[in-house]
Amino acid sequence: MRGGQKKYAVPFAPNPHFQTIDGNRLLLGAVVAERVGQAQEYVRAVFEGVWAKSTAFADDQELEDLLRAAGVSQIAEILQGRKQSQKTQASYQDMAEGAGVFGVPSMVVEDELYFGNDRFEFLEEALAR
């Protein structure tokens, strides 16, 4: 793990809450953050919360505090939209399953699946064709 931490220049601390984090809740928040134009800020805040700050994400207040500290301005819209987006979660899961996606990060280019951050170079080559 240390090699990846150095290569990608990202902080890392094992999160003792990892097994209890509701990933679906966080992913739905990312979908809504994309809709309101704050995906980058949201993803950065959640990534740091999971992998650097050992955040438990036990409730919405904890997520709200993390997003506020990261400068996310449309927190209420993200939290409310996430709750409403649970209805559309099944359609996203169907799309991912249909494309063969089984984990994160996964990218699909011309029906070719690229899984894992160690595949970004292959993805770049595919996009350059």
Image (tube, helix red, strand yellow):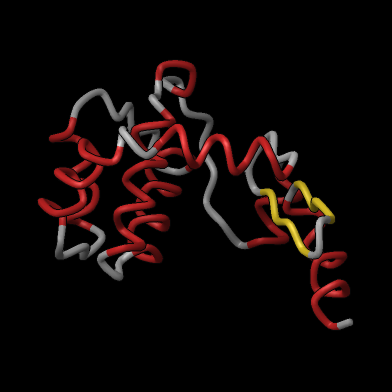
- Give whichever of 80, 23 is nearer the camera: 80
Tell me if 128 is positioned left or right of 84 in this view.
Answer: right
Q: Residue at x 41, y 55 (%)?
A: 43
Q: Residue at x 80, y 53 (%)?
A: 114
Q: Quadrant of the C terminus?
A: bottom right
Q: Quadrant of the N terminus?
A: top right
Is 104 located above or below residue 126 in the figure?
Answer: above
- Give whichever of 44, 83 is nearer the camera: 83
Q: Residue at x 14, y 54 (%)?
A: 77
Which quarter of the picture shows residue 60? top left
Count of labels shown?
Answer: 0
Q: Residue at x 30, y 66 (%)?
A: 38
Give how far across and how far down residue 65 sits, in percent.
16, 45
Tell me if 68 is positioned left or right of 34 in this view.
Answer: left
Which quarter of the picture shows residue 9? bottom right
Give how far across and how far down residue 91 sits, in percent.
47, 39
Is 90 located above or below residue 116 in the figure?
Answer: above
Give how far across and how far down residue 109 sits, in percent.
77, 63
Tell me if 50 is positioned left or right of 95 in this view.
Answer: left
Give how far across and how far down residue 18 sits, in percent.
47, 23
